[in-house]
């Protein structure tokens, strides 16, 4: 069970997720401190008062704007789950490549503080009792996320293909 720690609307840009003024910081170990830097939740994230596996719920076009990879790495650094009605294409690909758990749930309805159970096919809002269908990612993308990102996925595939001696 995961709690919704932030509810956002449509068209949340990468600049909201990871403001451009921090672009000099690119290391995945350093970017998390700037997650939602201009929102109140930033302090809770930096002070580690938000548990891993917490949920950010958003509307359509989450991650629009620039193609900055840091927008996904800053969220991955806090081990957040992003449940949105729809994602911007480049953000979704960056998220997959970094292993950020992204859930496409076109009808999601949840508020901050709601408890969600994210399954394979559905998201259940335990607070309201409502169930919402998940739009599955292509199997190849899901495999990359499940492996922890593109580097981990590729490393595993190379090791599996290597001759055993």
Image: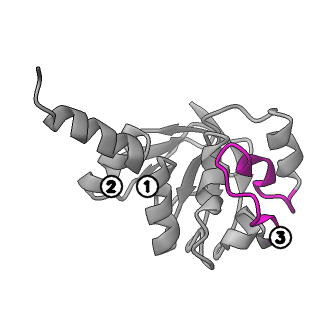
Q: Say which residue label 3 marks.
A: 21
Image position of 48 with respect to 150: above or below: above
| Residue 50 falls in image quadrant | top right
Q: CA distance from mark 3 to mark 2?
A: 30 Å
Mark 2 — residue?
Answer: 141
Percent x, y for residue 129?
Answer: 54, 41
Q: Farthest residue to the front: give it.
A: 165
Tell whether label 1 touches label 3 (CB within 8 Å): no
* Dot in front, 3 or 1: 3
Mark 1 crowd level (few <14, some 14–19, many ≥20, 10 Å Cα): many
Q: Which residues are magenta?
A: 21-39
Mark 1 to mark 2 CA distance (whole Å): 6 Å
Query: Looking at the image, which residue sits at the far top?
Result: 165
Q: Residues within 10 Å of mark 2 (few under 14, many from 20)?
A: some
Task: Tell me the residue at 61%/39% (across/down).
Answer: 79
Name the front one of labels 3 and 2.
3
């Amino acid at each position: 069970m995961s709690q919704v720690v932030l509810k956002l609307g449509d068209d949340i840009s990468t600049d909201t997720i990871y403001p451009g003024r921090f672009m000099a910081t690119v290391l995945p170990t350093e970017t998390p401190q700037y997650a939602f830097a201009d929102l109140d939740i930033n302090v809770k994230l930096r002070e580690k008062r938000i548990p891993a596996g917490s949920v950010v719920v958003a509307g359509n076009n989450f991650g629009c704007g620039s193609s900055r990879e840091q927008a996904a790495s800053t969220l991955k650094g806090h081990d957040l789950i992003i449940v949105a009605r729809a994602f911007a294409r480049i953000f979704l690909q960056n998220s997959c490549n970094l292993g950020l758990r992204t859930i496409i749930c076109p009808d999601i309805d949840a508020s901050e503080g709601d408890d969600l159970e994210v399954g394979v096919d559905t998201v259940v809002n335990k607070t309201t009792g409502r169930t919402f269908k998940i739009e599955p990612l292509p199997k190849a993308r899901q495999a990359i996320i499940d492996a922890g990102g593109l580097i981990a996925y590729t490393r595993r595939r190379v090791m599996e293909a290597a001759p055993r001696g």
